[in-house]
Amino acid sequence: MRRLMVTGGAGFIGSNFVRYMLQAHPDYHILVYDKLTYAGRLENLQDVAEIFSDRYTFVRGDICDVALVDSTVEAQDIDTIVNFAAETHVDRSLMEPGSFIQTDVYGTYVLLESARKFGVERYHQVSTDEVYGQVLDGRSTEADHLEPRSPYSASKAAGDLMVLAYQESWGLPVTISRGSNNVGPYQYPEKVVPLFATNAIDEEPLPVYGDGQQMRDYQYVLDHCTGIDTVLHKGVLGEIYNVGTGAEITNMMMTEVVLETLNRPRALILHVADRPGHDRRYALDVSKLRTLGWENQYSCVQAVEKTVRWYADNESWWRPIKSGDTYKSYYAQQYGKRLEDA
């Protein structure tokens, strides 16, 4: 692997992965291929473009665009595709599921076809623990059945199955990683931790769904990046690897960590109507990845604390987003009536 195409590389996890890989592997060249939707921003890669200008290339494009994907893979002599490109927010998937099917399923197919056509050395699919569905007891292993419960998780599960089908049907060299909830720098503030952090900074209500006792594994994004790097270099072809801390905290505990880190009062917590089909608990068994020598560096609480501090120190990044009409429209649609009723 020397010439990587990272789709969705201008998004939250993708941009952190690109930065990490260029720092960790001085002989790698990375091409970021990104549509630049609302959550994909060139600002996330501004420092990368300056520091690594000789080993970084950007192409604006949709993974559903067959001609552009093929021409990019061929012209840039790509040997590895890492696919982060996806519609990812559960709340938005309940509003507009069609875009999730288009990007997460059809887009994955387009990338797999290109990988097969041009004989790439590795295709890696970045997936999610949500494909397993809620796990009330025990932990999800890579061999478990998939039981997605939202349009988002269903679209990601479909993409995973397509990846495995290409490996079985044509011997395409693939791997899959399924990550728990990521937090860290450059995460669009529709997601719960940056949403709560930025609201708390401005002393606005923190809308907690239901009783807030849902259990989540909040992993710091760089732990996820090192996990994917480990899979790329040590993982067995055709295999799936869970990536997370292997522990969980409640959403109420996460909320309290946000407030304590920013020294804000618990009075900002506002319980609002839960979202439909809200999974009660996710829990990953990450022992398979650990057998490859990987270990997470941050606990769930440390991940949330570190993330909150980044948003407190980088208001210039998120304030233009939250003051924009696109974000305001989404926030009003998602939380307006819930906040009013609460």
Image (tube, rainbow, N blue to C red):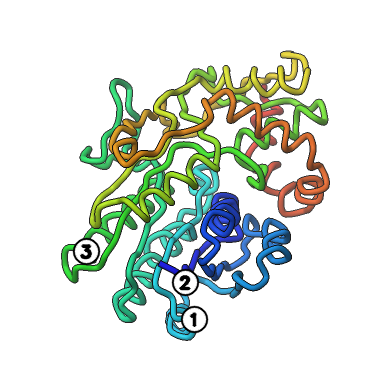
Q: Amino acid at mark 3?
A: Gln
To which residue does mark 1 refer? 76
Badge 3 element: helix
Which residue shows up at 24% across the image and 58% down it?
164
Q: Are marks 2 and 3 in contact (CB under 8 Å)?
A: no
Which callout, 2 or 3, points to the residue nearer the camera? 2
203 sits to left or right of 117: right
Residue 235 rendering spot, x and y as whole percentages:
30, 51
To which residue does mark 3 refer? 167
How many numbered marks have been drawn onto this rendered protein structure?
A: 3
Q: Nearer the N terminus, badge 1 or badge 3?
A: 1
Q: Amino acid at mark 1?
A: Gln
Question: What label does residue 3 carry, if any?
Answer: 2
Which callout, 1 or 3, points to the residue nearer the camera? 1
Q: Nearer the N terminus, badge 2 or badge 3?
A: 2
Give residue 205's quadrant in the image. top right
Q: Is residue 336 visible?
A: yes
Which residue shows up at 45% across the image and 72% down it?
64
- In the displayed image of the protein, which residue is found farthest to the left? 169
Question: What label does residue 5 carry, if any?
Answer: none
